[in-house]
Every structure is written in structure tokens, then in C-alpha cells.
Amino acid sequence: MSEETSNKISDIKLSENVNIKESFPVPSFEEWKAQVEKDLKGASFEKKLITKTYEGIDLNPIYTKKDIENLEFINSLPGDKNNVRGNCSSGYHKKTWNVNQEINVADVDEFNRSLTEALNNGQNSINVSLDTATKLGLDADYASTDQVGDCGVSISGIKSLGRALKKVDINSFPIYLDAGFNSIPFLALLNSHLTENKLDSSNLKGAITSDPIHHLCEHGELPINMSFSFDMMKLAVDWSKENAPNLKVIGINTLSYTNSGANSVQELAFAMSTLVYYLNEMIERKIDVNQIINKIQFTFGTSTNYFMEIAKYRAARILITSVAKEYGIDSENIEINIAAETSTFYHTKNDPYVNLLRSTTQTFSAILGGVNNITTSTFDEEIRIPDNFSRRIARNTQTILREESHLDQVIDAAGGSYYIETLTDQLAKEAWQNFKKIENNGGIFEELKTGTIQNSISEVVQQREKDINKRKSVIVGTNMFADINETKLQDRKFNQKAFQEKRAEYLKKYRLNGSEETHNNIMSRLNSIHSNNSIDIIDQMTEAYSDGATLGEITSALTSSHKKNIVIDKLSTRRSSENFEELREKAIQYNLKNDSLPTVFLANMGTVKEFKARAEFAKGFFEVGGFEIIYPNGFTSTDDAVNSAIDSKSSIVVICSTDDKYEETVPEFCKVIKSKNQDIQIILAGYPKDKIEEYKKVGVDDFIFMGADAMKILNSLHVKIGGIK
């Protein structure tokens, strides 16, 4: 800027009477919409700018103060009785959320080492993930191989639990453990550990829960009758009231729904129906409803839909409070505890480091939603057993969001957002209607038995798959922006058979260790457990564990007369990227068979300006299917393009140029190349509507364009070139 210009600017003075509001009037929503419709040039405002979510909610392009004027909770404060803004008036400022990372290792000694390291490096809670055998109450030598060490630590008695928690002060950290459909055997085992180490159970915090509905959804069966499962839930509540008042013992976990593809409305509705089911069963067993509600730990899966997830956790608190109100529970006495776990439905095996970004946004939204505990999935858990490095990265995701982003310093960061406040209200109302429908049909258990829940989730998954297949929903690194040359992560082999044999040998020696008198004491206590229905059985179990009884023996004695195999259609846990991952696997198998990846030749016609846009689109389109791209500089002659395509030995040729250029090149190109090799698949990049039939007649086999079904086209081409069906 010249000195002369600078002097002129400095001479300009604003009038003392300037009124910014009058000079720059704020347009009304109607004025804004009128301008937008003008800019759309006749296109539908609703179709172009309103987004329909999988929850059936219409997302507007803009929200205003008017949208939140009549919301019931809008003037509430954090800590108020409706709970929408969280339980605490200071948010996370005084008490941050619990970093609740899973350690999915089978061996108790390795688990202890990993847990100790985690607690020394940012984790502030103990998360004990049990393997399937332990949750079922089976000792490792009586379980099938695939159940031992499959998804967590294998524990069978007082010694193995002691090794798992060696030098860990469980009175200093909250402990979280999903015990499956019956928590009593593990509660007694933990009580035995406390007794042996002279620790006070009244200091226990966290949640050791049973959740028979979650177990049923996850496994498709329940090995005991539901009534007995609730009898055990009642015992857990009674015992915890007297011995561990700060411990939650009832779980309501929706992760199996989220990991099956359910939308947020469904997840909330299923949780509320489960809440009503459990409340009714406990009330029937003469437990005060005010005591039950604060013994429940809610766990929700977290998706990658950032704003929807923030609203979901806020809506959850509204709904829980609403259900409690229906039971006459004073909302001021409710302390809602919600855990969040990042859902693996959205994680990928291809380009797995993108999972770091996904889990970060998932964790971020859970924090802004005001949850109490967060489990962040490791980036590689869908590929291999996570190690200390991947667990550290997952744990540090939360540390960075707290220590560097300072999310613990802002109270209800989403509060006041026209969009999120409106979305919270819409989610709560939609979920409430869905919940009432489930209740009118008999409740969550009946709806699972008839398959209604499963079918409703399947309908949502089909919608999701349709959008993913057409790449309307983008999975970075999988159905868009794929790297076909990526180096796959190396698997970490875990020999389950060898591990089970090791555990079986240990248990055999463990059972033989001790005198005949000790064995007789164990058998006597097991017999008394069988015939006892009071909380005294937990003390009897505690002593039996101390004498050397195993978890399997205790569980068998407790449940032997209550066996009933309840079976439903298991929820189909899956990941959204699986279909495209299968395409990439087909390319890998093709490579093993032919010593090269399947190739696609781009017949780039004309100048760079003419072909580049569609050539780049075609390159990205075929790379997600695992195809290697041959990308020439461009051709001015049809004969040169055909000869190069034939010389490439590629079975797939894509013509890339402009619609105008196609009129002069496509007929001749197809005629010549088909005369030389009838089996070559000719694809046209673009979709010139008025020329489709004409181009098909001259030899074009298919068309690729924005909105095309990429899965259908790519899968068909794999089959046609001799790949795996």
C-alpha cells in the first residue's frame, strides 16, 4: 500500500451516528430462503437442502432462534432435574469423565501388566473385559476352545483374579465389568478377593452389571430362564445396598444394536423399553423403585454422526428422566450414569489409521453429550489383538481432548446451539414414540423373540448399504479415496487352543490342590448355595472361593436347577465397510492367481482439460474395488487409443472425455475394440441420458457416474474378468 493511499484511508472517519443494525439489516428466514430458491434456479429447496436421516428426521440447512422457542428444556441449567445438560452444575470442571479403556487380552498376568501401565498413564478407571467362557460361568477346561480368551481375560477363581488385580488398588479407581446375564458369581468372587486382601467393599465404585437382554442380543441365547436371571439381579441390588452402596449392578447396554447398524432413535427406544422391563421385574420382587434407578449403568454405542450423537446422549437423559417420572421417581434423586463406547460398525480394515479420526470424532461427540465414562476403540482391533501401543493411542485420544482441547473446562458446550437443541428435542420425541410402540407390542423381550427388533434394524442397514454402495455415504479409504498399494497390518497370532490347554492344565492342578477336608467344605457350601435364595449365598460363595472353588463350580451349583435355553435370532453384528473390503479381497486373490492385480485401462480422449475430470473420477471409482489403473496422457486418435488398450492386456477399458467428445469417439472406439476382442468390458465415464441406449447398442457395457451403484458394477466386473464370485 502506498503512503498516499494510507493517508487517504486514515482521513476517513465513521459518522458518530452510524447504526450497524440499520446499515446491515439481518435478513429474515423467509428472505434468506427466497434468495436460496432463486440461486437454485428452479431446483427443489426440499430435495436439495433438506437432509433425511436414517432416524427419519429432516435436517434443515439452517436453524434459527424460532426453532427452539417452545422447547420444554431450553431454559434449564446443568444439574437441573430434567438432566438434559448433565447431572452436575459444573460439568466436567470438578469431576472429569472416566477414561475407561478395554484391555482385551486373555492371560491374567499380561492383563495385569497392561492395566498397571494404563493406570500409570492417563486411565482413571479399571475396565475388566471377560472372555465368553467366564461370562457364561464356565471354567476354561469345560468351555469350547473358541470361548476361552476370545474377547477378554480368562478368570476361574480367587488366584487368577488376584493375579489380574495384583498391586491394583480397586478402592482408588472405579471398576467396570460386564458379567453377562448373571453377576452374582463374579460379585462373590470379587468380594472374596476384597476379603482376602482386607479391603472394604463399601468403598467400591463403578459398575459390575448383569444385563440379560444385552447378552441375549449378543449371543442369541440365554442358558437360564429369565425369571431366575431377575432373581439374581435382585440379589445383586440387595447385596450392593448393604455392602457396596456406590456400585451399580444393573446394566442396560445398547452396543449390540449400534454394532448391528441401528439408528439413534432405535437405540434410545430399545434402551427405554429395557429400562421399563427391568424396573417392572425389580418392583415385582419388592425393591423400592427409587433404589433401582440409581443402580443402573447405561451404555450406548457411539456412531460417527457427530451432531446426532451429541443430541442422542442429551436426549437419553430426557427419556430416562421421563420414564422415571412415570414411576413416580423424584427426578432430583436420580443420578444418571451413562457410558459411551465407540461403535466398530463404522471402523474399517482397509486404511485402518483412518479409524483414529473416526474414534476421535466419536469420543468428542460423547464428551459434548455429557457422558460419564468413555471407551475409545483401538484403531486396529478389527484386524488383530490390540497391543500396548494401540491402546495407548486410544487412551491418549481422550487425554488430548481433555488436556489440550480443554473439553473439561466448558459446561454444556452444545447448549444454546439452535441445531443441537432442536435435534435433541426431535430425537427424544421420535424415540419416545418408538418406545411406546414397542411397549404396546409386549415390550423389548417379546419384540426380540418375534424378531421385530431384528427386522427393524435390518431395514435401516439396507438403507445404509444402499447409500454406501452408491457412495452417497463416504467411508474414507474404503469406498472412496482407496489406496490399493497400502501395506496391511500384520496379524498378531493368538493360539486359542494352546491357551485353553494351558488354562485346563492349571485348573486341574488347582482343583487337586488342598486337603480332603477343604474339598468337603467346598462341596458343603456348594450344596447350600443350591438351596438358598437370600443374599447370604454371596457370603457362602465368598467362603467357597477362598477355599478353592472355581467360578464354574459356583455357577453350576447356583444355576443347575434353573437351566432353560432361551433362543432368539442373534443380532447380526457387522461393519459398514465389509462389502467393499470383500471387493478388495477379491483383487488380492486375483493377484495371487495371476501374479498381478486386475487392471483398468483409461482411454483418455482429447486434451487434458477434456478428459481429466472423468479420468480422475474413474481412477477413484475402480481403485475402491482393488483395480490397478493404467492412466495414459491422452489420445487424439481413436486408433491409437484402441491399440494402446489392446496392448495393455486389460479386460476393462473406460472411455473418459466430455459428452460432446463422446458423440464422435464412442461409436468408432467400441466398433474397433470389440472387433479385436469381444470380451473387453467397455465402460463410459458419465451418464449422457439421451445417448444411453445408443451407446449400449454400439458396445458400451456399463456407465459410471456420481450415484452409480459402485458395489454392483465392481462386483460384476470381478466376476466377468474371471475373479471370485
Image (cartoon, rainbow, N blue to C red):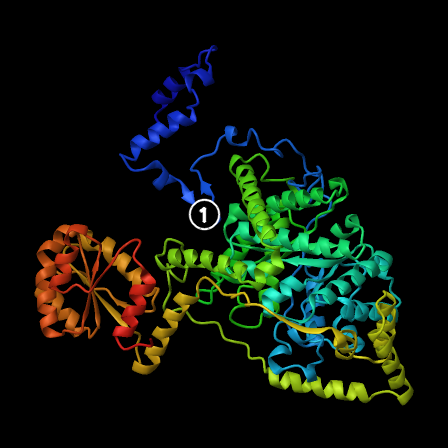
How far from the left and from the top, in percent, is residue 157?
A: 78, 77
Return the residue nearer the eye: 646 or 246: 246
The N terminus sits in image quarter? top left
Task: Please name the amino acid that badge 1 sits on.
Answer: Thr
Residue 163, compared with residue 118, is above or below; it is below
How far from the left and from the top, in percent, is residue 210?
A: 71, 63
Please give left or right for residue 391 compared with residue 202 in the image.
left
Q: Residue at left 83%, top 88%?
A: 513
| Tag count | 1
Q: Quadrant of residue 705?
A: bottom left
Please give left or right for residue 509 compared with residue 340 in the image.
right
Q: Residue at left 27%, top 70%?
A: 717
Residue 321, compared with residue 696, is above or below; it is above
Return the residue nearer the eye: 140 or 383: 140
Q: Residue at left 42%, top 55%?
A: 463
Please give left or right for residue 103 compared with residue 422 in the image.
right
Residue 648, compared with residue 79, is above or below; it is below
Q: Is residue 710 visible?
A: yes
How far from the left and from the top, in percent, is residue 91?
A: 68, 42
The C terminus sits in image quarter? bottom left
Q: Quadrant of residue 131?
A: bottom right
Q: Quadrant of residue 594?
A: bottom left
Disc 1 target residue: 53
Return the residue nearer the eye: 156 or 413: 156
How far from the left and from the top, in percent, is residue 696?
A: 15, 61
Q: Residue furthest right?
A: 517
Return the residue nearer the eye: 358 or 409: 358
Q: Is residue 373 visible?
A: no
SS state under label 1: loop
